[in-house]
Amino acid sequence: MSVSAAIEVDAVHKAFNGQKVLDGLNVDFQEGSITTVLGPSGTGKSVLLKHIVALLYPDAGDIRVFGKSVVGMGDNELFAMREGFGVLFQDGALFGSMDIYDNVAFPLRKHTKLPEDKIRPVVMQRLGEVGLEGAQHKMPNEISGGMRKRAGFARALVLNPKIVLFDEPDSGLDPVRTSLLCDLILKVHQEHGGTYLLVTHNIPTARKVSDYVGLLWQGRMVHYDTTEEAFSSQDPFVRQFLAGDSAGPLGMD
């Protein structure tokens, strides 16, 4: 085990209806770092995230979080482990019937016994950090997609997680709002630390926020290194994907 790995994915296989999605995947995600996993559509990026939080289980192999096997955990241990995670889904995954304040407060009300007078300053702090302190009484359908992402980010942070997972956080955002979201991710990580893992198709996002970049293809991590090494790689597949070129080993299939 690497002592600096927050998450270890060890020879993980997963298939759906006989179709391999993860094919002996091996990768360690470094503690305290921001790592982006890139890859073409359908290569298993979101499936990888679901394995890490045990929403899916591997057909073979193991996943360890801070050295503990997720596969072998009982319900109580899994529940406790998940409290250490924050997850930002593609659309923010906000509850449409709750205003922004109640959405962000939800994990505190569900997972802690804090009274409301203790919950409020935590929620308002997180809303302030993502620039939504004046929008706490708005409903999700009253704010922009970018604001919903930020509200989802605030909710993901509210329990002070050691690990934050981002599933396509920049999907549906224009380039300017994507860049602003990247700035926010960097700012919050600098202030609070933790291990951040993003999956995305967006090359500028990976270049801007990442300490490490992994490239997932055909169920395996075909490249994993520092961001600098990734973007200077001479590997034909890595160069093609990161440059967005049509010429190279990656085709339409």
Image: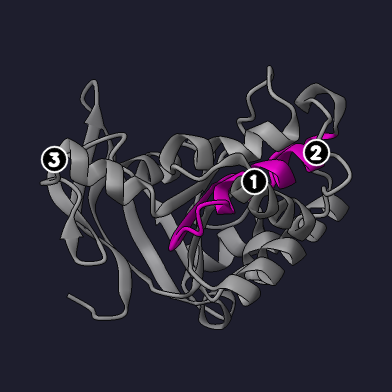
Q: Nearer the viewer, residue 10 or 139?
A: 139
Q: Nearer the viewer, mark 1 or mark 2?
A: 1
Of badges 3 and 1, the one in the foreground is 1
Q: Which residues are magenta?
A: 144-172
Instruction: Please name whichever residue, 127 or 87, is drawn nearer the observer in this view of the structure.
Output: 127
Where is mark 2, residue-wise? 136
Q: Residue 225 in the image: state x and y as whole percent.
A: 44, 76
Please identify, in this view, whether the residue under mark 3 or under mark 2 is nearer the observer. Answer: 2
**Disc 1 element:** helix
Q: Is residue 249 above or below residue 87?
A: below
Q: Which residue is mark 1?
A: 117
Give the percent coordinates (x, y) of residue 164.
Answer: 49, 56
Residue 10 in sight? yes
Residue at 89%, 45% in the rendered image: 134
Direction from residue 16 to residue 240 in the image, left or right: right
Residue farthest to the top, as pictured: 97
Residue 230's disc number:
none
Three-letter residue code for mark 3: Gly
Q: Nearer the viewer, residue 72 or 213?
A: 72
The answer to whether residue 43 shows anywhere in this view is no
Tag shown at residue 74: 3
| For marks 1 and 2 on the same chain, the one whose residue lies earlier in the sequence | 1
- Residue sitting at x 36%, y 40%: 50
**Does the segment drawn in magenta span residue 107?**
no
The Cα atoms of the two marked residues, 1 and 2, are separated by 16 Å
Residue at 86% across, 39% down: 135
Image height check: is 77 above or below 29? above
Check if mark 3's residue and mark 1's residue have beta carbons within 8 Å.
no
